[in-house]
Image (cartoon, rainbow, N blue to C red):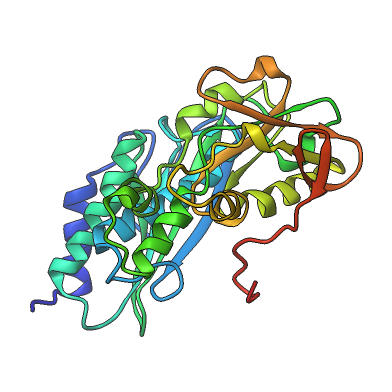
Amino acid sequence: MSRSSERERLALLRALFGAAEAPSLGVGDDAAVLVDPRPLVATVDAAVEGVHFRRDLLTLEDASARACEAAMSDIAAMGASLDGPGCGLLLSWTLPPALSDEDFLLLARGALRAARRVGTRVVGGNLSAGVELSLSTTVLGRAAHAPLLRGGARAGDRVAISGPVGAAALGLRALLRGDPDPRWREAVDRWRHPLARVDLSAVLSGRATACIDVSDGLALDAARLAEASGARVVFDRDALRLHPYATADEALDATLHGGEDYELLATGPASAFDARWTLVGEVLEGAGVYLRDASRLTEVSPQGWDHFSAT
């Protein structure tokens, strides 16, 4: 098992990620230089082995790509883009001393795959040795208009989702119980290979009133949007696309509380959303998150992923 020096690994990254074109400077100097007059939208996200991923459930290449997609999803939720000057990824990786060159290359290929998928590039970062593998990703995006916030939803807005949620959680559950049923293959793929919805930034920008990405669970993330907006979010149960192979209760639980789908939850007038979106509810005066079944409203507990809670 070969292990190269930090200098050799940085050289590999420079060769793999390439040099950034002017007016930007990328991998190779003490800092990246990004020039663009549009508003800068920045985020940072960490993926830690044993907390966010396990090597027995996915490859290191997929773990790296997944970490980048999760971070880029935050940029998409702000209505920003990643495909122009002044945009890019900064990777800060903590690597166990025993990590081989082969595994390091898998990590690099995963980041490159994610960056190329959305038309952006890796412009810098940092390598450090540590006890556990940790992949931190900083993403720099640009907004054509004012960045989209969580706090803009108002009574009368429609609620829309960019795609079905719940499958990623069901896929992870199938992996953890070792369920070989091929019916779960698509759900497993949704967990292993999430895709940040940066393709919808142009649709959101200047049209939607509020947005958040569904990373920690639909109910929990909707509760964050509702709280920031000082409003109530109501989902119509019949409009939610539940997974066909789970029981009704399991499918609804995964949809509301599963997380890691990285679809976008947005509010605004119905005209703000094209055919790629599904209208799933409305914003009302009040507070909290509710599920509407026929004419009955039931408050939904904002459960979901929380790093510092057992629930």
**Residue at 73% from the left image edge and 29% from the top image edge:** 209
Q: Is residue 136 left or right of residue 183?
A: right
- Image location of residue 155, percent across then percent down: 86, 30
Q: How many marks?
A: 0
- Above or below 160: residue 165: below
> Which residue is most to the front?
247
Residue 221 image point, x, y percent: 67, 50
Residue 58 in percent (x, y) is at 28, 62
The x, y position of residue 300, in whole percent, is 75, 53
Q: Quadrant of the C terminus?
A: bottom right
Please indicate, yes or no, whether residue 147 appears anywhere in the rendered image. Answer: no
Q: Does residue 93 lie above or below 149 as drawn?
A: below
Q: Residue at x 61, y 56 (%)?
A: 257
Residue at image x 27%, y 51%?
182
Q: Is residue 260 left or right of residue 302?
A: left
Residue at 44 percent across and 52 percent down: it is 168
Judged from this view, the residue extending furthest toward the right is 286
Say whether residue 234 is visible: yes
Would residue 95 appear left or right of 67 to someone viewing this image?
Answer: left
- State which quarter of the image contains the N terminus: bottom left
Q: Residue furthest left?
A: 1
